[in-house]
Amino acid sequence: MPLDAAAEQDMNSSNGQRARGPFSGVLVIDLTRVLAGPFSTMLMADLGARVIKVEQPGSGDDSRAYGPFKDGKSVYFGFVNRGKESIALDLKNDRDRALFLRMVERADVLVENFRPGTMEKLGLSWEALSKINPRLIYASGSGFGQTGPMSRTPAYDTVVQALSGIMSITGYPDGPPTRVGTSVADLTAGVYLFGGIASALYARETTGRGARVDVAMLDAMLSYLLHGVMEYVAHGRALGRLGNGHPSIAPFDTYQAADELFVICAGGNEVFARLSEAIGRGDLARDERFAHNRNRHENHEALRAELEATLRTKPARHWVEVLTVAGVPCARIQSIPEAVAMPQIAARNMMVESDGMRILGNPIKIGGFDDPATRPAAPALDGNGDAIRAEFGASEERATAAKR
Amino acid sequence: MPLDAAAEQDMNSSNGQRARGPFSGVLVIDLTRVLAGPFSTMLMADLGARVIKVEQPGSGDDSRAYGPFKDGKSVYFGFVNRGKESIALDLKNDRDRALFLRMVERADVLVENFRPGTMEKLGLSWEALSKINPRLIYASGSGFGQTGPMSRTPAYDTVVQALSGIMSITGYPDGPPTRVGTSVADLTAGVYLFGGIASALYARETTGRGARVDVAMLDAMLSYLLHGVMEYVAHGRALGRLGNGHPSIAPFDTYQAADELFVICAGGNEVFARLSEAIGRGDLARDERFAHNRNRHENHEALRAELEATLRTKPARHWVEVLTVAGVPCARIQSIPEAVAMPQIAARNMMVESDGMRILGNPIKIGGFDDPATRPAAPALDGNGDAIRAEFGASEERATAAKR
């Protein structure tokens, strides 16, 4: 390896800093772009895998151009690509393709989220690559999956949210269907894809063979809608929009304080009695209309009026303090900056340092492995290219690289 | 094993029907209740693990009493416990506890979602059980995690949605914060817990040792809010509610047809031109106000007015047909029954048969393993108890069991 490349690797790659995790020693070739795929390989990297991002020369992963930006760099790209390496390869160029195939020979996992059919067109199908490396886990994330009539339909998170039904059940009964305010279809597919890769790696220890993993955003999103599907299976009807309330328990909703809405979850009779006492409304626990959950649920609007007559006199922070002391589950509706500032989030190492900024940490905590408070930066495009070329190049190419 | 027990096992347990999956041969002791934990072990069972649910004698998992019901049985319980076995054990009773500890000796994984501290009080801490079985993966799901100042605070999905910030960014700019219409915090924790278990099982192949897995609903939910955290990190401000729209691209939102709202995602200039032509409004693509994405985004309300003047003349189904032919990503906002009826969902085996009803399938598809269209029923409380007692009982107890 030429000195320059080694120095660059020290600076840019995660090699020196990679966390010791359950996937230490696992090599992941990462062809994914934007969100669902990169999120899955981010989890792999967070848990110790070596992830080499193979990017289009010139522009690389589309999300390198996505805002927000900080110091000229995409914060978006930085969040989901920390701890990965990058090489720019044109998979239609013979020399780059040869290098890529040598990487595949030695890889444990390949992950891609092209539209189904694209890898086949490139001659890089599961069938082709598993011939080169029968131990390869070949994991694909897509909008609708590798099979079925919609397989090749392009998908956006919002399209999948609309089709899955999650928009139809989010929002208020008298209001419009509502998109979940984050890319929940992409991210859920990403976490399932990660789980599928981990499962296939475990299975390989027994079978000795790789496997094809196929996760669809639509399948992933639908799997989250089990309450709605239950309602349909049991009663043949569509679940509607419930606002912030519970379908059968009260009080279990958002309630208006002097300044803002906040959450109270006080379904049982005992906790309802504690709630009533704590806010100085012991009368409510003795009121026949609210004697049992069934009554409270049936008379929820009357109960809301009684509760809010008192709750509207003081701000939400006050009530949350009072109710927490009384052992009544409740919460302010926090903004994201408020959530991030929670001591609990700090204690859980859920905000970590990377490349001079604070980014989200890894939610899978596994004892005995590292969960570092500093994560390696996301790579520059082709930032590890020379080192990777030197490492995986054929012998004459290695010689050429060394002379560069 | 007594004949009765064997017969019962044949009828009630998954032993005869268990899918061949990546976790075939893995024994999971499942102490979880209700949703996040059972969802994680459901994924394990779907992928071939043997999952033995250890339930409180008498009532069992709380969710056995949750609606909806069908033929007197909880559909809720059926959905998330298909393919598991059940034994009722009182962990404070010496005899039951001894049996439980013998199960732990032979288990690969123990999963629990009690409030942190409960397992310790029962004398069943990670430290205690890993002495009995150093290869045990001990996985805990909780509201806030095993560590930190809020560790022992009870959590409900709605509380975690409120604290994490997801409610603050879901809904319309002029409307209230909105709960995601499904238990997204519970379910996300469940999928991460599953991923953590799979990761720890893989690591054990190298280390020879089990590990403690610790997943919190709050960490899990926050990890999904990366766009909001990015905004805060880059600009120091809270992301607000955007309704169904995109922060920087237009048209990329829901639009009003004659009958209902539907989704159009047409950010690029080419796809916007196709959209304009397809709805007979080629003039829009030539309008200076809408010439580039930046203009379209700045003038989104004007663009919406122009688009909806046309879109309101025909129903959403019409426009979705027309736009799909034109290659413009779009979608109706489907109800859950409509989502479930999609041919794509059938092709993906995402609705399967179990116990005489249709339930959700498994979204992790791994080639070479089973993805059966019929899943074993959820167990009756203690439905496999005799067989499990016979299998794991000490020799004199086995003799007693055989004489019963």
Image: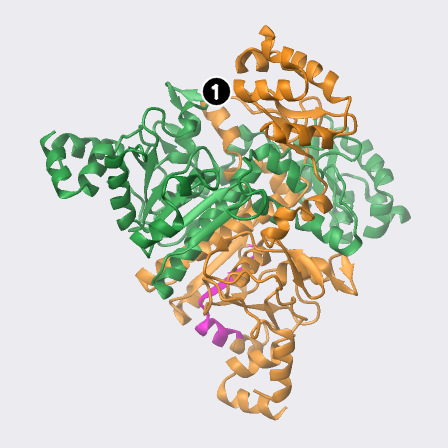
Chain colours: A green, B orange
Where is residue A154 drawn, in percent x and y? Answer: 54, 35
Quick one: SS at disc 1?
A: helix
Q: Residue at x 12, y 29 (%)?
A: A404
Quadrant in the picture for the C terminus of chain B: bottom right
Amino acid type, residue under disc 1 in the picture? His
Q: Residue B161 at what x, y percent from top left?
A: 62, 39
Vertical position of residue B378 compared to residue B312: above or below: below
Residues in magenta, as a range: B100-115
The quarter of the picture where residue B68 lies is bottom right
Image position of A94 (left or right of B251): left
Q: Give how far across and how far down residue B106 sits, in percent.
A: 45, 73
Q: Who is closer to the viewer here, B377 or A297?
A: B377
**x, y (%) of residue A367?**
39, 54
Image side of residue B251 versus residue A54, left or right: right
List the single residue furthest toward the bottom: B403
Q: Is residue B114 magenta?
A: yes
Tell me if residue B386 is in the magenta stretch: no
Q: Which residue is mark 1?
A: B235
Considering depth in this image, is A388 or A371 the residue closer to the camera? A388
In the picture shown, does residue B386 fall above or below A103? Answer: below
Image mark 1: chain = B
Asked whether residue B146 appears in the rendered view, the answer is no
User: Position of B384 compared to B70: left or right?
Assistant: left
